[in-house]
């Protein structure tokens, strides 16, 4: 719901502290009670984050989270935490986002969702329908197999690290979009870059000579950790459609790399 592991942990800590003060024997349904409490605190946090992001420098991307290969085996779960999907969810108002996640990802009953968001059940059903239509219109339409996706990502990594310019061009879609997030703290493009030629020129210009690309798993799919002179410099995830990379998401903001950490030089693939 939040697109940030740090914010999610803060909410869960607050839920835990509040739960510690609850007389558990008086709670009829602990699960529903916790869902309601967590949702309401998350909605409050979402509204606060929306105000902060108005002042964010450059492109904002969801915080990358280190996962394990087995997450990808649950296709629905992996899709729900992918960078591309989290960006789609960012376009939903807070209540619609909460209703969509609770219903579509966790299959929470409508009556429980209604209590959590403090709306009537008919209203929640309408919100859920509107959110589904919004997400369906904007979510990536990809039917690529996991094997094909992994192969394309590995080609991108090898071409970039080896300086094979033609191979890099071949793996990028003509209308590829590159989004970079430096948060105003490190160098990054302030706006998305559109088109293979422009993306290629940008990557060629900013790629240092001593770059090492380490395979890791982020947000339920293979990704790349950028290492320069032995130090982690950022991470990259991508969307693969029809055998080519259509979206590139590069996060360099150091505040967002804590949950994407893996030992430098250690492959997670």
Image (cartoon, rainbow, N blue to C red):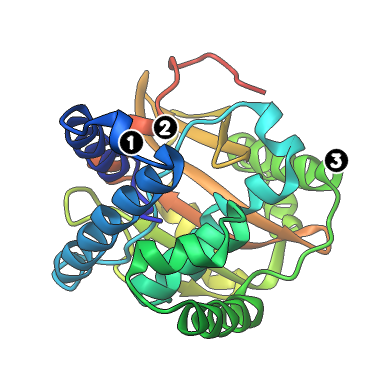
In the displayed structure, would residue 24 be above or below residue 198? above
Residue 42, image x, y percentages: 29, 55
246 on left or right of 67? right
What residue would you read off at disc 1?
A: 257
Q: What's the residue at 35%, 53% (across, down)?
A: 36
144 on left or right of 209? right
Query: CA separation, marks 2 and 3?
Result: 23 Å
What residue would you read off at disc 2?
A: 260
Quadrant holding the C terminus: top right
Q: What's the residue at 61%, 77% (across, down)?
A: 132
Q: What's the residue at 34%, 55% (across, down)?
A: 39
In the displayed structure, would residue 245 be above or below residue 89? above
Quadrant holding the N terminus: bottom left
Classify mark 2: residues with Cα within 10 Å, few (<14), some (14-19) or many (20+).
some
Query: CA separation, marks 1 and 2?
Result: 5 Å
Near-viewer residue (172 or 6) = 6
Kindly check if marks 1 and 2 are in contact, taking CB atoms under 8 A apart as contact. Answer: yes
Q: State which tag comes first along the sequence, 2 or 3.
A: 3
Marking on residue 117: none
Residue 170, image x, y percentages: 76, 58
Q: State which tag comes first along the sequence, 3 or 1.
A: 3
What residue would you read off at disc 3?
A: 147
Query: CA separation, marks 3 and 1?
Result: 27 Å
Kindly check if marks 2 and 3 are in contact, taking CB atoms under 8 A apart as contact. Answer: no
**Could you say whether the residue bearing mark 3 is in a helix, strand or loop?**
helix
Classify mark 1: residues with Cα within 10 Å, few (<14), some (14-19) or many (20+).
some
**Could you say whether the residue bearing mark 1 is in a helix, strand or loop?**
loop
Residue 261, image x, y percentages: 40, 25
């Amino acid at each position: 719901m939040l697109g940030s592991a740090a914010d999610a942990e803060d909410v869960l800590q607050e839920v835990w502290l509040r739960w510690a003060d609850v007389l558990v024997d008086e709670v009829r349904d602990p699960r529903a009670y916790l869902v309601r409490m967590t949702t309401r605190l998350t909605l409050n946090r979402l509204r606060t984050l929306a105000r902060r992001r108005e002042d964010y420098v450059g492109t904002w991307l969801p915080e990358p989270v280190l996962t394990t290969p087995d997450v990808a085996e649950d296709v629905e779960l992996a899709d729900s935490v992918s960078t591309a999907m989290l960006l789609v969810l960012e376009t939903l108002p807070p209540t619609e986002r909460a209703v969509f996640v609770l219903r579509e990802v966790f299959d929470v009953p409508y009556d429980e969702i209604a209590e959590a968001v403090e709306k009537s059940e008919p209203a929640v059903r309408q919100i859920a329908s509107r959110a589904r239509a919004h997400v369906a219109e904007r979510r990536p339409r990809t039917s690529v197999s996991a094997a094909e996706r992994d192969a394309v990502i590995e080609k991108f990594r090898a071409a970039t690290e080896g300086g094979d310019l033609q191979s890099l061009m071949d793996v990028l879609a003509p209308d590829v979009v590159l989004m970079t997030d430096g948060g105003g703290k490190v160098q990054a493009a302030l706006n998305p870059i559109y088109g293979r030629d422009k993306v290629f020129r940008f990557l060629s210009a900013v790629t240092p000579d001593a770059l090492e690309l380490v395979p890791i798993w982020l947000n339920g799919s293979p990704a790349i950790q950028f290492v320069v002179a032995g130090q982690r410099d950022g991470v990259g995830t991508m969307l693969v459609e029809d055998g080519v990379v259509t979206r590139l998401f590069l996060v360099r903001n150091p505040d967002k790399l804590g949950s994407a950490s893996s030992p430098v030089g250690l492959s997670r693939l």
